[in-house]
């Protein structure tokens, strides 16, 4: 019995989304195809046709999303530990890919998110009152 193509893609995405972070590194298109009982080439072709991006690209995107969440939610975890947890053996390569997706390095991403989440702890933020107290003036252009 043939599965409907969009349903097959949904199942592939569901399978990826239900994987633990630790399993993402080993997850491949081949594994997903085996799980769904279809050939790798068929799954890859149908996924690309139905979603306009490859399943491999989707796996990488999911890793990047999860790594961004780990950067914020696991502040004690180093970037190296985090990259290894989601399946990158080379931290430098992880940082390059992360920067391509988010436009900023993993460390800077963490710092920026920290400042957004905890602005009261941000030593660099100057309120109007602090500006007056410290002698900082607003520069008009």
Image (cartoon, grey):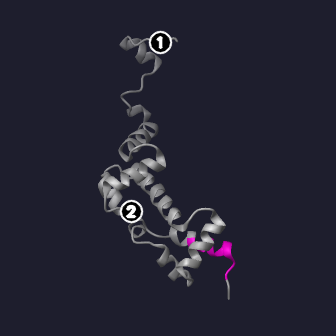
In screen coordinates, is 73 left or right of 40? left
Q: Does the magenta portion include 9?
A: yes
Q: Position of residue 50 (x, y in %)?
A: 66, 67
Q: Residues within 10 Å of mark 1 (few under 14, many from 20)?
A: few
Residue located at (45% from left, 60% from top): 63
Q: Nearer the viewer, residue 134 or 65?
A: 65
Q: Secondary structure at mark 2?
A: loop
Judge left or right: residue 131 versus residue 1: left
User: Is 120 situated above or below 21?
Assistant: above
Which residue is label 2 attached to? 86
Identify the residue under disc 1. 139
Mark 2 or mark 1: whose residue is earlier in sequence: 2
**Callout 1: SS:** loop
Is there a contact, CB below 8 Å, between mark 2 and mark 1? no
In the picture, residue 107 is in which quadrant? top left
Above-or-below relation of 61 to 136: below
* Residue drawn at 49 percent across, 73 percent down: 29
Q: Is residue 72 visible?
A: yes
- When asked about the image quadrant of residue 110, the answer is top left
Instruction: Pick whichever, 9 or 21, lies toward us.
Output: 9
**Which quarter of the figure is the N terminus placed in?**
bottom right
What secondary structure predominates along the stretch shown in magenta?
helix
- Whole-percent x, y for residue 78 in the image: 30, 52
Q: How many residues crowd around disc 2 within 10 Å: few (fewer than 14), some, or many (20 or more)?
A: many
Bounds of the magenta segment? 3-12
Estimate the x, y position of residue 106 in percent, counting from the top left.
38, 47
Q: Mark yes or no: residue 77 visible.
A: no
Residue at the spot 31% in from the left edge and 59% down from the top edge: 90
Residue 8 within the segment the image draws in magenta:
yes
* Image mark for residue 119: none
- Relative to 26, is 9 on the left or the right? right
Mark 2 to mark 1 CA distance (whole Å): 45 Å
């Amino acid at each position: 019995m043939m599965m409907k193509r969009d349903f097959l893609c949904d199942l592939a995405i569901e399978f990826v989304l239900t994987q633990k972070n630790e399993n993402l590194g080993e997850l491949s298109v081949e594994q997903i195809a085996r799980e769904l009982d279809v050939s790798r080439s068929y799954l890859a072709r149908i996924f690309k046709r139905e979603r306009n991006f490859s399943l491999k690209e989707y796996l990488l995107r999911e890793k990047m999303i999860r790594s961004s969440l780990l950067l914020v939610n696991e502040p004690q975890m180093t970037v190296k530990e985090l990259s290894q947890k989601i399946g990158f053996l080379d931290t430098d390569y992880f940082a390059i890919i992360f920067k391509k997706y988010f436009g900023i390095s993993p460390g800077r991403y963490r710092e920026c998110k920290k400042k957004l989440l905890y602005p009261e702890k941000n030593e660099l933020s100057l309120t109007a009152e602090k500006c007056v107290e410290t002698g900082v003036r607003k520069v008009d252009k």
